[in-house]
Amino acid sequence: MTKTNSGRFFEDYKVGDVIRHAVPRTVAEGERALYHALYPARHALYSSDAFAADCGLDGSPLDDLIAFHVVFGKTVPDVSLNAVANLGYAEGRWLVPVYPGDTLRSESQVIGVKENSNGKTGVVYVRTRGFNQHDEVVLEYVRWVMVRKGNLDAPAPEAVLPDLKKVLSVEDLVVPEGLTFDDYDFGLAGEAHRWCDYEIGEVIDHVDGVTIEEAEHMIATRLWQNTAKVHFDLTFRPEGRLIYGGHVISMARALSFNGLANAQMIVGLNGGAHANPCFAGTTVKAWSEVLDKAETDVPGVGAIRLRLVATSDGSVGQLKGEDGKYLPGVLLDLDYWALMPI
Amino acid sequence: MTKTNSGRFFEDYKVGDVIRHAVPRTVAEGERALYHALYPARHALYSSDAFAADCGLDGSPLDDLIAFHVVFGKTVPDVSLNAVANLGYAEGRWLVPVYPGDTLRSESQVIGVKENSNGKTGVVYVRTRGFNQHDEVVLEYVRWVMVRKGNLDAPAPEAVLPDLKKVLSVEDLVVPEGLTFDDYDFGLAGEAHRWCDYEIGEVIDHVDGVTIEEAEHMIATRLWQNTAKVHFDLTFRPEGRLIYGGHVISMARALSFNGLANAQMIVGLNGGAHANPCFAGTTVKAWSEVLDKAETDVPGVGAIRLRLVATSDGSVGQLKGEDGKYLPGVLLDLDYWALMPI
Amino acid sequence: MTKTNSGRFFEDYKVGDVIRHAVPRTVAEGERALYHALYPARHALYSSDAFAADCGLDGSPLDDLIAFHVVFGKTVPDVSLNAVANLGYAEGRWLVPVYPGDTLRSESQVIGVKENSNGKTGVVYVRTRGFNQHDEVVLEYVRWVMVRKGNLDAPAPEAVLPDLKKVLSVEDLVVPEGLTFDDYDFGLAGEAHRWCDYEIGEVIDHVDGVTIEEAEHMIATRLWQNTAKVHFDLTFRPEGRLIYGGHVISMARALSFNGLANAQMIVGLNGGAHANPCFAGTTVKAWSEVLDKAETDVPGVGAIRLRLVATSDGSVGQLKGEDGKYLPGVLLDLDYWALMPI
């Protein structure tokens, strides 16, 4: 009865430790097809080999969020199994595109710990890196989670809080090698709006909505080999399966095509909050706000910083109440950088 | 708020206009696997590379209806977004098989417009062509839809009604290059019945049925990047999501294997009506009627013209009532040509 | 109305007959991705090309149960269509791994028949073989089913009962050519337990559970081109769709990763019983018992014989009641051999 993984508890994380996560994964055309089947994804660079080749890439990469979900999924058995809450993200960077046939694995370094005053839980900060089969880092991000203590008598560790950037600067972002928007076909991409057409502060209602079914989010979450019980087992959570927060991220990002069809590549994740839990039956809609714009060092390639908000009530432009807390209709508040033709 | 696509209205279509649809799509083994997962598809030519090679092809093409759905899906944002109803199809022809790795895009030419007498809607006729990455036309068909006017004061255009063939003749059909049934293995194909065993007027009950679930039809419809709201958003259509008509076509065609296992390739679409809407919970069954038979100019390759009817009530052989209207249990009435070993 | 397959009845099976099953199938990366989406499968050898290459294989094979389901699915129209019950399995052996791009077909030889005393049904024993495109046998197994008689007046055939091994010996098992665990990475595999850490009689609770949804099991079952009505058509079985027994096998095997992450390859199937029917809404959990251990003739490669039990009630270690019958909470009792690093 002792051979199964009961997960790590707060006291098991030491700053500096590197956790090598299990189960490397080869991703290919099947994962791409499923991504299109599970989300209304239409960004042309991730849909067409020919379009991507015209943008200077070796065919169409897998969606940046496929890379994120696969890398994230591997961390679940080591990081989230006894987690009470997923508190935040920072310093996420996509460094190398992932192509069909690549094999991904993940490692996380513990970069901070702080026991909570209740003595029952603590916050753990990890920097996770995803590697491909060439040992290139394809993706990295910081995540912090609240984790239960297994042994309430374990002494509180010295608190270490990492110094994290609130926002990545454009210099932190990596434009994939060879990327060019010189021959970008706006007609095939689906919208005429280019980087210079967006204004800081602009809010975009993405209009479309999807009412989520149980089978869909479970299929998606399993695809990333994320096996956290709460997403699958109704006896564990009789009030309904909690939908994996990443499912809401992908759904909202795909919906944002309508108004942001040219925000092709995600290259930076500044922060993110799963503001409220999401359950099957919810109709997810999305809106975006342009937070910033910057030119990259590649001519013609602009960076746009976007707040992507997923909602359960169709509201647009409202985020927090007077108490500073997220409104109940907000599911996700994500702050990311994307690349767009100038 | 003005960056999203609000779709074209009736007055936006001018005869002669060519609409280049967005979001090219590379289709591969993943789409094939999903097609087999979503429909009980068993036609051997689309299941086995080895079987297809024995039929003279370069491996197994993707199902003809995958090509149709992908090409059709691209037209939705430009043709169907403000459509009230999908009225009909004509002159559909499959010209070049689609293989894994091909990239498809679509164009539609407006070939007819006619404002309705109510002044609020009109009928638009488009001829849609799907292209592969070599700019070969892989598929073409005419579709007409009823579209809302955006500006009720827009003057009615001169009515133009295209001259469409009621039925494609066998000379209009294209037998894929290299196709041969000389070494056709009826045992592996699943049935012994050949072209000469079918009689005009014969009705075949395909027996099997599938009760459709919400998650399935949404997964299918998204796979074709068809993002029409009615298929996904329960707040938009609280009485239930309307199932994409193409989902019913694929379901019925797959069910028709039982009795028509050798009607391998779809090469012509003479017409089609989505007779009644379909919702989750419906048990789709199907029957076919042999409408015509003809020999192609390739020895051993026969063409069979079939009426494929999908039903919600399991009825067989009944189509319309005394009033000339489709019976309530009829979901689909499709008239197509398939190729079969003589 | 006579062109559809009404299936074989008991009197149609003659000992010695070989039935060539229809619809060969090419399996590829899409099937692999769907397998990961439908089951919480994490065995590293089937997840990562790089991990499999380190184990001496030509990349990651498709899951052994994909091979089983595809080969099995083809037999349904010829063996199970008029079956009352699937009674048992024996002498199952995986002989050659199946790789993406392989094309599978199936044949079954009738090796036993015995009419039941009621004169209405009989038991048919078949040995099914799955072949790849090189005509190599990739998989074989014996299955016996109870089948209805079509003609109650047909005389009872001479009873022939095949002599089947209760358990395959380690000499019967085939270790895939080239397989080595010499450089096996336990960290990437997910658990440290090796062959020598397991004791005969040991029981492992796999802890995790999945509550099954209708759409999922239908998608899975169709993927294997298993079209038995009972799994799809609610008008045929209004009390609920019966979940394909193989879906429960794959779910339980995937859940068994937690505690048996290094039981990588399934090479033998000694027996199996679908103890109770499974319907949507069931939360499937699993436990295993170590039944035996043996060394293969490949140094470092151990064989472990496992009883894999799927449950609907989360019970662990209990199988049968005092009456010798399976307890109502037991869905599956499977006896198989797997390969594990010593």
Image (tube, coloured by chain):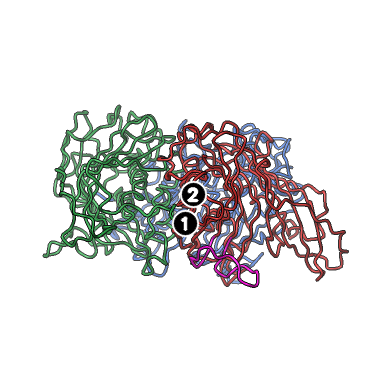
Chain colours: A blue, B red, C green
Local SS, label 1:
strand
Which residue is depicted at the point 42% across and 44% down? Answer: B190
Q: Chain of mark 1?
A: B
Q: Is disc 2 in contact with disc 1, using a CB cutoff of under 8 Å? A: yes
Residue C31 part of the magenta-drawn span: no
Local SS, label 2:
helix
The residue identified by callout 1 is B206
- How far across and down, in percent of the image, does residue A290 sit? 69, 54
Are labels 2 and 1 on one chain? yes
- Point out the tag, 2 or 1, that comes first from the N-terminus: 1
Residue B329 part of the magenta-drawn span: yes
Q: Quadrant of residue C292?
A: top left
Query: If the image is split into quadrants, where does the N terminus of chain C sit?
Result: bottom left
Q: Amino acid at mark 2?
A: Leu
Q: Is residue C76 above or below residue B185?
A: below
The residue identified by callout 2 is B260
Q: Which residues are magenta?
A: B310-332
Q: Is residue A120 above or below residue B181?
A: below
